[in-house]
Amino acid sequence: MNDFLTTSGVDNLIRSYQSVQYSRRVYPLEVRQQKFSTLSTGWGDLKTKLTTLKSSANDFKTTSDSALFFKRSISVSDESILTATATNNASQSSYTMRVNQLAKSDLIVSDTQASATAVSSMAGTQTIQIGSGDYTSSVDIELTGAETNQTIMEKLSAAINADKAVALSGSFDPAAMFSGTGSFTIDVNGTEDTISYDYGTTSKTYDEVMDDLVNDINTNVTGVLAEKIVDSTTGFVSLQITVEDSDDYITIGGTASFLNMDVTKEKGASGLADGSVFSPATDQSKFSITAKESGYDNRLIMSDTSGSILNQIGLTSALLSGRTVTTDDITAGFIYTSTSSTDNQLNSKVEFNGINIQRNSNIITDLVNSVTLNLSAVNEVADPDVSVSVKVDTSAISTDIKEFISNFNNAYTYIKNNSYSSGDKDNRGAFVGDSTARSLMTTLTNLGMGQVTGLQDGNYSYLSEIGITFSPTGGLSISDSSLLDTALEENADQVADLFNSTNGIATSLYDTLENYLGVDGSISNLIKSYDSNVSYYKTKIESTNTSIDKSADILRRQYEDLQMQLLTLQYSFNSMAAFSNGQF
């Protein structure tokens, strides 16, 4: 009784009440919640493993020649001379090569001139033309008459390096009215956009039309800047479109009757060549220009078209047209000979399997189908031929297959290990007795050891025929790597069919997993259901705990009231006892 009258005594009673209520009401809920949580976690982990396996299956079910079963390795006997790469569909082959000449970019130099010598007779606009490959560009250079040899070269170089492709329309009276509908295309380096206009019902002035087109082009066409140009003398307006990248060309079509702006593959000089000025000796200047692309087909073709700025620095029309090669460090001329497509120092020259061939570049992509050759040095006379061979990259393909097997086994063994019970109810696997897990395990087993149907008679139809076997204990494994290598080297198409045909292993696996893993797939629905149950019991547990706590508070107040009553009674009893004993 005395213990009941203490705070600790009440606390013990309340804790005892809460413990009994937890055991009766909360613990069973927690057991159920843990069960569904374990199931959700188990299926969630399996879903992750199956998603990874599905991704591998997707890689393996590609049916084109670029599929991973057709990967190629390429070996070169002397990589200081050349290197090579091969795409997946390259034919197995071997050949010998000798690099006799590397491709070079055409290069022209001016006369060496005294830097400070004044040149006052060339004031005005000087125009030159530069051609390389399929492109020709005109460049204007503005001279004041106060230049020196050095500043003329610097202005020439700067004008070339700043020149971009520009398309300019005809000039129009800004107040004149235009009506009509139509469209035109703007092609920037192969990317084409269409600009449409419609003034069929409401005509506008050319000034307004130009503003509309500038806004439309700058909003919708990438890689160009459109501007309205106003002639300072006449006030007439024009549309100017300039590419932003100097290496890009521009083609505009469909505007002849409207803007007079038809342009075909216009490229600026800065996209064709690089100009520079240097000092070979103190107080001397020399101009050089180098083609951006190598080879004879991209040789530089230059001329003065208005004025004589090139002639002024020693690049005369006779020298340029005759492609005169400089003979010393002072005079103007070409650095490399280029008499003809067969007699030049600009192309790469290779002896390929005894046949002499030339290309514009040191990167050759059109000599052997699906093989790229990168030339880096010339064979010396005493050097042996360079041997190149293309083979099936069995190592890379085997690595991919091993990854597929690993992903397969991760899913298979996870299902297997969670589908058995040790007899201890607390250690039951998450998938024990589950029909979905059992179905998945059966599917994986059949794919691992079953026959692929629908293949041509005599072709591989079992994984075991290519050295891959299935064990119910651990799943797939490469049991005979030499057999697999032989199959990949000699019958890669049959190996591919085994995986990616209509009934192939990867195709069937991908389709099966798609049904399980989709938004409304069976596994996704299971996880949703389990998570819903976990959430339900979480809420139920919280509300039950709240109810128990409220009941405990009520019980505590009742105990406290009883304490007060007992204390009062005890006080009265003590007083009466004292009176009876004559203490008062």
Image (cartoon, helix red, strand yellow):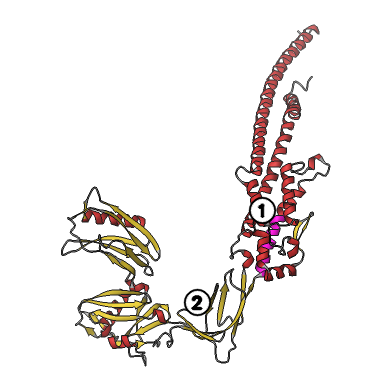
| Type of the residue with mark 1 | Ser
Query: Was residue 205 drawn as part of the magenta stretch in this picture?
Result: no
Local secondary structure at mark 2: strand
Q: Which residues are magenta?
A: 394-409
Which comes sooner in the sequence, label 1 or label 2? 2
**Position in image of residue 193 (x %, y %):** 37, 59
Question: Is residue 389 at least partly visible in the picture?
Answer: no
Residue flagged by tag 2: what amino acid is it?
Answer: Ile
Report the residue at 45% width, 83% height from top: 347
Q: What predominant SS class does the magenta segment belong to?
A: helix
- The reply, left or right, for residue 220 in relation to residue 440 is left
Q: Residue furthest front?
A: 457
Q: Residue 508 got which mark? A: 1
In the rendered image, the vertical position of residue 267 relative to residue 562, given as above or below: below
The numbered disc on residue 363 is 2
Q: Find residue 253 and report its image quarter.
A: bottom left
Q: Which mark is residue 6?
A: none
Residue at mark 1 to residue at mark 2: CA–CA distance = 42 Å
Q: Is residue 119 left or right of residue 163?
A: left
